[in-house]
Amino acid sequence: MAERKKLVQIASTAWEHPADRAALNTLRSIPGFDIVVRRIAAFFGEIGIRQLFLANAVKIGPNQRPRLWAMYQEVLETMDWPEVPELYVTQTPLVNAAAVGFDKPFIVMNSGLLELLDPEEQREILGHELGHIMSGHTTYTTIAIILMTIGFQNLPFLAGVAILPFQLALMEWYRKAELSSDRAGLLSTQDPQTSMSTFLKMAGGRKYDDQISVEEFQVQARAYETQGNVADRVWQVINTAFRTHPFGTVRAAELQRWIDSGEYAKIVSGDYRRRDDASSPPLTSDLEDAAGYYGDQAKDAMATISGVLGRAREAFEGAFKTSSEEK
């Protein structure tokens, strides 16, 4: 491929998805949000966070996985990020990576991810996680991971906080933040095919002794977005309500939409917001763009979701009652 362009002084607002910023502002507006953030940060602290995530991981450097370390330095150079967040690899078959921490965020890659992906796809993941750091996502990401790992019920200092609205809003933001960082991953590789093959493998695994097709996966992604009626779309919302990541097909389709818009090409050609002019677009602009992203179909789905959940609850209660009576 052609030599990657160094994105000198690029600001994270150059690639951030408007739905990411709108969802974050919604999250911040929830009563008690600031209390949750302060209490969790104070309880765990920077040292506690590192202990929580690094109990069994290996720090990467020039003499520890030097190939991965060298690639990481290239990603930092491409994104023109002067800091060098620490990088770790932890042994687990789960395919994932994360950028976590409060004051000094760091990146953790699971060994299962390294086994699944080719080197250039690993570059995409490094760029994705660096994107989280550059966007300032890590405080909220860390809180989300803590709450999913430990659970609200095991953090007594959160007693009295309205949990469900916070949890749903946090997960919604988390998924939209992934769409932003998918763009950062693409900018770090500057190879759309690599990004799409990464989504494909994370959804369906390696090819092993068979063949896999990025093109067919993109067709599937478009079908997932466009097929079905309102009820189907409601279940798409329900199925993702407590997920941290969007489905792979959704991520592929959304990134392709960004490429097709011409915004990716503009950035690579040098037309982007710099960090010395990094003021965020106004929230009203984010909300308008996010509304366009969700579209009328998504609005219809959300308008009927309460009815679907109600019917699902009634059906469950009816089945449980029948089962109890048969005993």
Image (cartoon, grey):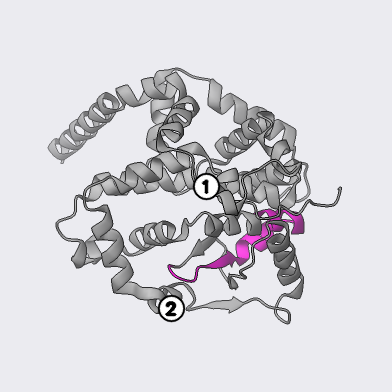
Please name the amino acid that badge 2 sits on.
Gln
Q: What span is colored magenta in the figure?
A: 102-124
Magenta stretch encompasses residue 255: no
What is the x, y in percent for residue 191?
76, 45
Q: Is residue 226 left or right of residue 143?
A: right
> Quick check: 147 above or below 21?
below
Q: Foreground: 142 or 92?
A: 142
- According to the picture, the residue beneath numbered tag 1 turns out to be 178
- Distance, label 1 to label 2, CA atoms, is 25 Å
- Residue under the image location 67 percent in, 32 percent down: 218
CB under 8 Å between discs 1 and 2: no
- Tag 2: Cα neighbours inside 10 Å, few (<14), some, or many (≥20)? few
Q: How many marks?
A: 2
Name the N-terminal-most of marks 1 and 2: 2
Q: Is residue 100 above or below residue 212?
A: below
Residue furthest out toward the bottom: 63
Instruction: Give residue 155's position: percent from left, percent from top.
Output: 24, 66
Q: Amino acid at mark 1?
A: Glu
**Above or below, 152 relative to 57:** above
Identify the residue at horizontal 50%, vertical 68% (top origin).
105
Res. 183 in view: yes
Helix, strand or loop at label 2? It is helix
| Residue 103 among magenta residues | yes
Q: Position of residue 81 (x, y in %)?
A: 64, 62
In screen coordinates, is 155 left or right of 249? left
Q: Residue 116 shows which numbered tag? A: none
Query: Which class describes the residues within 10 Å of circle 1: few (<14), some (14-19), or many (20+)?
Result: many
Residue at the extreme right: 2
Answer whether residue 151 is visible to the viewer in this image: no
> Residue at the spot x=60%, y=46% of the render?
182
The dot on residue 51 is 2
Write down the quadrant of residue 326 in the picture.
Answer: top left
